[in-house]
Amino acid sequence: MSIVETIVKEGIKIIPSIWDKISEIYKVHINRNNFLHICLYEVKINLDIIATLKTKELRNHINSPAFATLIDSFQTKAITLLMIGNDRKNYKHFLQLLNENQENQENTEELEQEENEEAIKEDKVKKKDKEEINDILDNFNFVIHKIEALRYISNIAQSGTDFLKDFNFTSRINNIERSLVSISNCLKNIISKQNKKDLK
C-alpha cells in the first residue's frame, strides 16, 4: 500500500498543495527510505513556517481565524504515521537505521580513541553530546504532541479566551523548533548514509 493510500485509509485530511509535492518526492526516491524523505520534507515545511513568525505576537491572536489557519498549516501527518501509524514496517525500519547509525558512530569513536590516546577527553565530550536513540524518538513525539495540542487550544479559543491560562507561546514555539531541527539533522544524516550505501 502506498503512503498516500495509507493516509486516506487512516482518515487524515490532505492538504493538496503539499501532498502533491510529496507524491513527486515519492516517485523520485524509489529506495526503501521513501517515508523518511517525506518526513524530512514535512519537517522542513514546519521550520520554514516558524522562521516567518513573530512569536511574541501569537498570544494576542489566539482566538483569531489567522491563528487557526497558522496552526493548521503545521504538518505532522507523515511523522505521526511513522511513530504511531497502523503500519509498523516504517517504524521498525526507522529504528533499525537509528541503531545502525549509532553503532557506526560508536565504532568510529572507538577507532579514533585507539589511534590517538590524547583525544580521550574530547571523545568523552562527543559521547555526552551525541543524541541517544530515545532522545531522538522523544523529539518526534514532542513535536506531534505539542502541535496537536496547539490545534486543540486554537479550537477552544474560538469560543473565548477568558478561561485559558496565560502561557509563553514564544517558549513553546522555540521548543518545537529545537525538536524539529534535531529531527531534521537526524533524518538528513540517515538518508545521506543510506544513499551512499545504495550507490555502492
Image (cartoon, grey):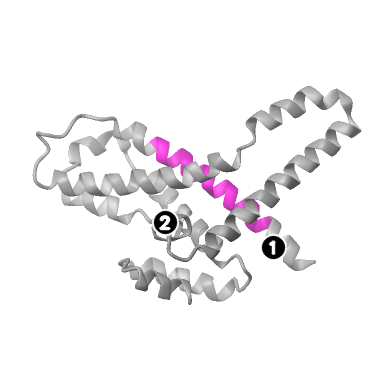
Rendered view: 118 above or below 48: above
Relative depth, front residue between 3 and 9:
9
Helix, strand or loop at label 1? It is helix
Q: Residue drawn at (34%, 47%), measured in percent from left and top?
A: 147
Amino acid type for the residue under numbered disc 1? Asn
Q: Which residue is mark 1?
A: 195
Helix, strand or loop at label 2? It is helix
Q: Residue drawn at (54%, 76%), measured in percent from left and top?
A: 27
Q: Residue drawn at (15%, 43%), measured in percent from left and top?
A: 157
Magenta stretch contains residue 188? yes
Instruction: Quarter of the image for the C terminus: give it.
Output: bottom right
Q: Which residue is mark 2?
A: 80
Span shown in magenta: 174-192
- How far apart marks 1 and 2 lie (CA) works out to 24 Å
Question: What secondary structure characterizes most of the magenta part?
Answer: helix
- Closer to us: mark 1 or mark 2? 2
The reply, left or right, for residue 91 in relation to residue 197 is: left
Question: Where residue 100 appears, x then y in whole percent?
Answer: 70, 51
